[in-house]
Amino acid sequence: MHLAEIFGANVRRVRLERGMTLESLATEADLAYSYLGGIERGQRNPSLHVVERIAHVLESDPAALFCRTQTPEK
C-alpha cells in the first residue's frame, strides 16, 4: 500500500469514527468534496497544508494519519 493510500484510508477511518460525512469534513476543512474523496481513495497527494487542515478538523495528529494500522483494511 502506498503512502497516499494509507493516508486516505486513515482519514476515512477517523472521519467515520467521528461520525462525520465526507461532505462535512470537506466543508470544515475548506476543501472540494471531490478532492477529499480522491484523497480518501489514495488518488490525490495532498500538500502538507491540506494534511494539517484535515488533521485539525479530525482533531488528530497529522503524523498519525500516515501510520499503517495494526489490522489490514478490507
Image (cartoon, helix red, strand yellow):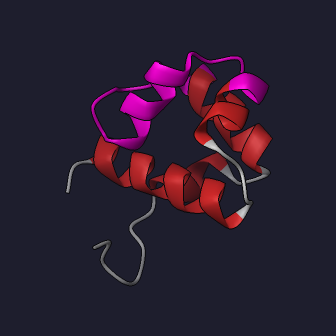
38 sits left or right of 52 in the view: left
Q: In percent of the image, x 69 and y 53: which residue is there? A: 61
Asked whether the viewer can see residue 69, the reply is yes
Position in image of residue 35 (x %, y %): 45, 21
Q: Nearer the viewer, residue 17 or 49?
A: 17
* Quadrant of image for the C terminus: bottom left
42 sits left or right of 21 in the view: left
Magenta span contains residue 74:
no
Q: In percent of the image, x 42 and y 46: which residue is there? A: 8
Magenta residues span 27-49
Q: Quadrant of residue 53?
A: top right
Position in image of residue 37 (x %, y %): 44, 33
* Quadrant of image for the N terminus: bottom left
Please determine whether, in this image, residue 22 is positioned above or below residue 19.
above
Q: In percent of the image, x 63 and y 53: which residue is there? A: 15
Magenta span contains residue 36:
yes
